[in-house]
Amino acid sequence: MSEESVGRTSIQVIERMMQLLDALAEHQDPVALKDLARDTKLHPSTAHRILNDLVACRLVDRTDPGLYRLGMRLLELGNLVKARLNVRDAALELMRKLHRLTGQTVNLSVRQGDEIVYVDRAYSERSGMQVVRAIGGRAPLHLTSTGKLFLAAESHDTLKLYADRTTLRGTTLNSLTTLEKLEKELVLVRTEGFARDNEELEMGVRCMAAGIYDDSSKLIAGLSISAPADRIQEDWLQELIHTAQRISASLGWQGRVIPPSGRFRI
């Protein structure tokens, strides 16, 4: 057999293995060989031979004679992949593209206690007027767009504890310094799926933020655009959300990614 023929055969075996794994993934309970052969359109003897190899590798478990389910080895491998995923690595290139489209600073932030921490940013010294946040800089949750995303995920009781701890101190006339005002704002965040900072942390600066989620749909970070108040554009919002969702998808989030608006291409 030629080297080319061997290569084609090997690829065909891998394709059939993936067909069987995908078929098993469609079922919560163990699946009979005849059903797997039917779903994959493989001959039962072919399916049986490949399943035996997958069982030997612990990618598939044989629960009873003729019954199969996905194996624990897949969970072990999945956990390794998850542990090696890094939100900064997943985000950076898309952040740079979003910055090139808007000309404004794009921030990646995470929550630490009662504050958000800026862990990365995309900006250019050649761009015009920008609001550049220092990497490692911190800000109270209730004064930032990303912070509001995290607060919006909290219960009323947890939010009240946050208000008691921080006293909802403000830094500008626009800061939300009462629990009533903050809760009203968070209702909007939950309804709209994004958050804003309307000169609440710093006068003359407005921000918009969208959440980044992991494979369990847990909010793990926020992606935001910071700009001078008179320069921020509503057109950026859908691009921001689209970018955050693409980053989330690369981390295993399985929600529906909205398309970009069409004005920009990320």
Image (spheres, helix red, strand yellow):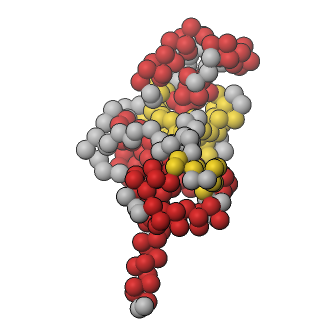
Q: Is residue 135 left or right of residue 5?
A: right
> Toward which corner of the image does residue 178 lie, by quadrant?
top right
Position of the N terminus, as image quadrant, is bottom left
Residue that lies at the very extreme toward the top in this rendered image: 180
Q: Which residue is painted at 55% across and 22% down in the image? A: 152
Judge whether 262 appears above or below 178 on screen.
below
Residue that lies at the very extreme toward the bottom in this rendered image: 2
Percent x, y of residue 58: 65, 60
Judge whether 246 appears above or below 52 on screen.
above
Q: Which residue is painted at 40% across and 52% down in the image? A: 39
Q: Is residue 57 visible?
A: yes
Q: Which residue is painted at 30% across and 50% down in the image? A: 265
Percent x, y of residue 258: 35, 39
Q: Which residue is painted at 65% across and 35% down in the image? A: 111
Residue 95 or 40: which is nearer the viewer?
A: 40
Q: Is residue 72 left or right of residue 31?
A: right
Q: Is residue 144 visible?
A: no
How many marks the image carries: the answer is 0
Residue that lies at the very extreme toward the left in this rendered image: 262
Percent x, y of residue 61: 63, 54
Percent x, y of residue 127: 40, 52
Residue that lies at the very extreme toward the front in this rendered image: 65
Residue 202 or 81: which is nearer the viewer?
A: 81
